[in-house]
Amino acid sequence: MTQLVFEQALNGLQFGLMLFLLAAGLTLVFGIMDCINLAHGSLYMVGAYFVAAAAQVADSFWIGLGAGVAGAAALGLVLELSLFRQLYRRDHLSQVLATFGLILIANEAVRTIWGAQPLLLNPPEALSGPLEIGGFFYPAYRLVIIAFGVAVAGLLYLLVAKSRVGMWVRAGAANRELTEALGVDVQRLFTAVFVLGAALCALAGGLLGPLLAVQVGMGESVLILAFVVIIIGGIGSIRGALVGSLIVGTVDTLGRALLPTLLRVALPADAAATLGPALASIMIYLLMAGILFFRPQGLFPARA
Amino acid sequence: MPLRLTALAAALMLAGSVHAADRIKVGFVSTLSGPGAGLGVDIRDGFNLAIKQLDGKLGGLPAEVIVADDQQNPDIAKQTADKFLKKDKVDFMTGIVFSNIMLAVGPTVFENHTFYISANAGPSQYAGEQCNPFFFNVAWQNDNLHEAVGKYVQDKGFRNVVIVTPNYPGGKDAVSGFKRYYKGKIAEEVYTKLGQLDYAAELAQIRAIKPDALFFFLPGGMGINFVKQFVAAGLSRDTQLFAPGFSADEDVIKAVGAPMMGMFNSSHWAHDMDNAENKRFVADFQKEYGRMPSLYASQGYDAALMIDGAVRDVKGKVEDKAALQRALEAKHFKSVRGDFRFNSNHYPVQNYYLRVVGRDAGGRITNRMMGTIFTNHADAYVSACRMK
């Protein structure tokens, strides 16, 4: 029983941390630049494809991950300089239209280059088994993902809360005009934040590649969850993104694990299995609705 | 204008009389993208290989195969089928992988009085009460391969089993098939979302139950991820995996590799079956596509041969539906699985075999035929079928 609870908690943590990698970039772009980027999920997909392709060429997962993240950061740079720079001043409708267009372009481009079938990405051989700690088993690769998530969260905290650049980022999120007036080069700051967001997307895509599948359209479903996370956490807040991700990750995993079992008491297995995950995903949206009702700015609003 | 008049005159002359078609059009709608794509691609490649061997013809007439991707979405499949039937006026349809899609498309095809030759999906509905003269399944009824595994697990003395399957019609057929022959305890039936790829929550649950055997039916990318994650979680030490051939064929073996070794699975076909047709099929498939054929590929291949045989029998007069139905029922082709016949519900009566994944003489990981589980096995729904 302890094993089960502990394992499910780790599963929730792992899922939550990966959501955090996506939500962190999204919340900064949304919070600081006031730009709705629907194509954030496409950066996640393209990043995963970069990692998978590079890993195949280099025959090493780690080299592939590094190269893929660098490639996605470069793509982020090109996108920011060419397209997003034009969008910051536009209204949200233009942003939604332009970035929705990007989703379609990205999906078709990936389909043309890599084909419609999913790419295979295997974890490093050494991590393909379980890790045993005092009779407790957990997949080694998932532990590595958790370690990556914790490390990135720590680094982001240091960057945003302790560094000068982080101070500008926070200032930009709280009041953009005043920050500009104080002489911060907001344009370069925006570029840096966007590139960082793209790199984090690719990191999440590359790390999740071996557990899921690197395929066309993988970004759309996760994008919705990332938006839920930043609404719960408060737009523009890294801390909010972390807390929101962990809440959504835990609720989703526990819902998937516990609800069918609980429902089994009253319902046949297949009905319980249909109802369980549906209820679990409804819980996430109920949570979001509750937050919007009682705390419309989210748990940790950037603009206090 | 003169041309149009000629065409009209020709149409008037031919109207009412059954004439031989000048070519055979096949509408091939299948899952060619997403995690289920491997199945559709194999069926398509098997189907095309047969036509290539027949010099681009079906029953002696030039063949035209229109291929479309359903993206594993019943709505898209239905729209595509509508287009095939109304605009392209296809003579046959085939290709669908998943039973939920088959059940969504079926009524449209049957109402149009077009023959559907299923190279995969074999839902229990179409084997029983909703059986239809225009539906043939050249592969199996969904339950069959699961029944064979259930029988083997029962005979081997496993008594505490967990079942994992997606929550869709094919998954439910799998559970009823397995339970029809396995009589021991079922500790848990785990139903996952169709297309789910991360099984962390389910695997934790399985670890807590500690079953001695686990039966899973997760076709395509789902099964690939499940086996990898099952091994990564360290569950393979205490629990023996069993699966129908779908989850232990070349597509999964290629992706998972060594952890698949020793996995028993059931199939109606195996690449090492000793008959001339199969040897030619396996050799040509490898030459054409550079990979081993899977059972899906053999099914696609057989579907093309079945259409070829029937069109030949009716001498190209595919408009005579009654004659065409009789020709299809007569099954004048040699299947790569050896001999079989069609039951009154248009599903096969055939043998089911046990295979095990291991290394062959060349050191390659692949399936090896172990023995026969069922001989001339029919599905359990045929008695409910009143073919009109």
Image (tube, coloured by chain):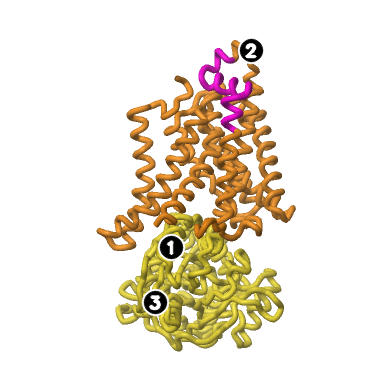
Chain colours: A orange, B yellow
Callout 3 amino acid? Arg
Task: Name the foreground residue: B230 vs B345.
Answer: B230
User: Subunit of mark 3?
Assistant: B
Asked if marks 1 and 3 touch (Cβ < 8 Å), the reply is: no
Q: Which amino acid, by three-letter code, is at mark 1?
A: Ile
**Residue at the image point whose x is 64% and y is 49% from the top:** A49
The label nearer to you, 1 versus 2, is 1
Please tell me whether residue A285 is drawn above or below residue B265 in the rendered image.
above
Q: Nearer the viewer, residue B189 or B165?
A: B189
Dot 1 falls on which chain?
B
What residue would you read off at disc 1?
B206
Position in image of residue A246 (x %, y %): 46, 40
- In magenta, the rendered stretch is A156-179
Nearer to us of marks 3 and 2 is 3
Nearer the observer, B18 or B248? B248
Residue A78 shows up from this direction: yes
Q: Which residue is mark 3?
A: B159
Alpha-carbon span between mark 1 and mark 3: 15 Å
Q: Position of residue B303 (x, y in %)?
A: 53, 75
Mark 3 residue crowding within 10 angstroms, few (<14) / some (14–19) / many (20+): some
Q: Residues within 10 Å of mark 2 (few under 14, many from 20)?
A: few
